[in-house]
Amino acid sequence: MSKVKFYFNTKTLKYEKVQMRVWDRVKQVLSYVAAGLVFASISIFLAYTYLDSPKEKQLKRNIEELSYNYEVLNGKLNQLNYVLEDLQKRDDNIYRAIFEAEPIPDEIRKAGFGGADRYKQLENLTNSDLILESTQKLDRIAKQMYIQSKSFDDVIKLVKNKEQLMKAIPSIQPIDNKDLKRLASGFGWRTHPIYKITKFHTGLDFTASVGTPIYAASDAVVETADAEARGYGNHVVLDHGYGYKTLYGHMSRFAVRAGQKVKRGDIIGYVGNTGTSSGPHLHYEVIKNGDKIDPINFFASDLSPEDYAAMLEMSEINNQSFD
């Protein structure tokens, strides 16, 4: 019940009751209602601005969870890409280098996908930028992994070929030389023992008595076993494959014939003094793709590091050859 209000009438000098008209009461009620509406509006505005509804709270939790999962997925994709790049570097710079194969060009490894409409169906999705970026990254990784997988298939083939190559590369000394005293002349410019002129010596000379066994430097097929080449006398040429051949000159006699297969360490003949020779010795050459190269580089697996260093030093002495 509303309070009764009085006012002081100066004419009658008495307190008289305030008589409120209906309109005054209506205005009073309307003012209360307006104030309530303003307060309610402010309250609702503040509530919607700073307070979340249960549905909004659930949506925010869903967004946070999705964002976290996206970050985890993106991190795993980056980690996968890092591992893949490491494999690619190893493939190009180690595996393929070992097997003398060309690295895969970047334009092949990282080539893009064709077709402008490849990702069109993703453009109108919610968070399409994130989905599109992740999908493109995943596609790039998948393609590079496929290329790397094919590359490893090639490396496996190279390994198999390399096993045969390692058997083919000349790798031991052609005569028994444990004391390292039989190397008489090295590869390079030397004084010819007969013509007394400086001439390029295309192999190594090992001194040994007539009849000393000569060994195949690696697995091969006997290409030549005769005395037809001028200067070499009785000589044998072995074809090891992969562009490698070895020549053994001035033999006293043969232990093989043309067309015969031999293994590393098999006896192929015996030291002699035939052809243009100034004394019993073996003239030994290594030929790669038709070029005569220094045989001293092919003894590392047959010698200790110290013995190989000593052999290398002896081969560089500028002296007179035996042929």
Image (cartoon, rainbow, N blue to C red):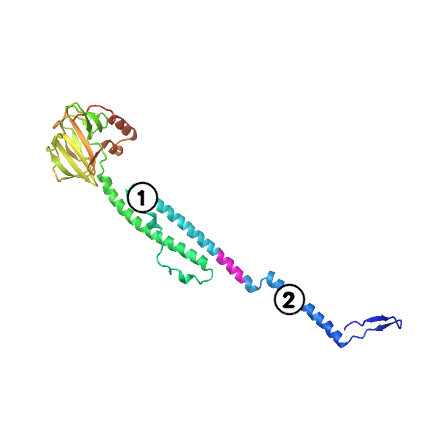
Label 2 Cα crowd, 10 Å radius (few <14 / some 14-19 / many 20+): few
| Residue corresponding to mark 2 | 41
- Is the residue 94 above or below the residue 7 in the image? above
Residue in the image at 30% along x and 49% along y: 151
Residue 194 drawn at (x, y percent): 14, 23
| Residue 274, disc | none
Q: Specify the amino acid type for callout 1.
A: Tyr
Residue in the image at 40% along x and 61% along y: 120
User: Is the magenta region chiefly helix, strand or loop?
Assistant: helix
Residue farthest toward the bottom in the current orientation of the protein: 22
Residue farthest toward the front in the current orientation of the protein: 11
Residue 134 drawn at (x, y percent): 42, 56
Query: Looking at the figure, which quarter contains the N terminus?
Result: bottom right
Q: Secondary structure at mark 2?
A: helix
Query: Disc 2 vs disc 1: which is toward the camera?
Result: 2
Q: Secondary structure at mark 1?
A: helix
For residue 207, which quarter of the picture?
Answer: top left
* Viewer-side residue, 111 vs 161: 111
* Viewer-side residue, 302 vs 132: 132
Q: Is residue 186 visible?
A: no
* Viewer-side residue, 122 vs 76: 122
Side (left or right) of 207 relative to 3: left
| Residue 95, disc | 1
Is 63 one of the magenta-colored residues? yes
- Is the residue 49 above or below the residue 220 in the image? below
For residue 287, which quarter of the picture?
Answer: top left
Residue in the image at 43% along x and 52% along y: 76
Residue 30 drawn at (x, y percent): 71, 72
Residue 311 drawn at (x, y percent): 25, 28
Q: Which residues are magenta?
A: 58-67
Label 1 Cα crowd, 10 Å radius (few <14 / some 14-19 / many 20+): many
Q: Specify the amino acid type for callout 2.
A: Ser
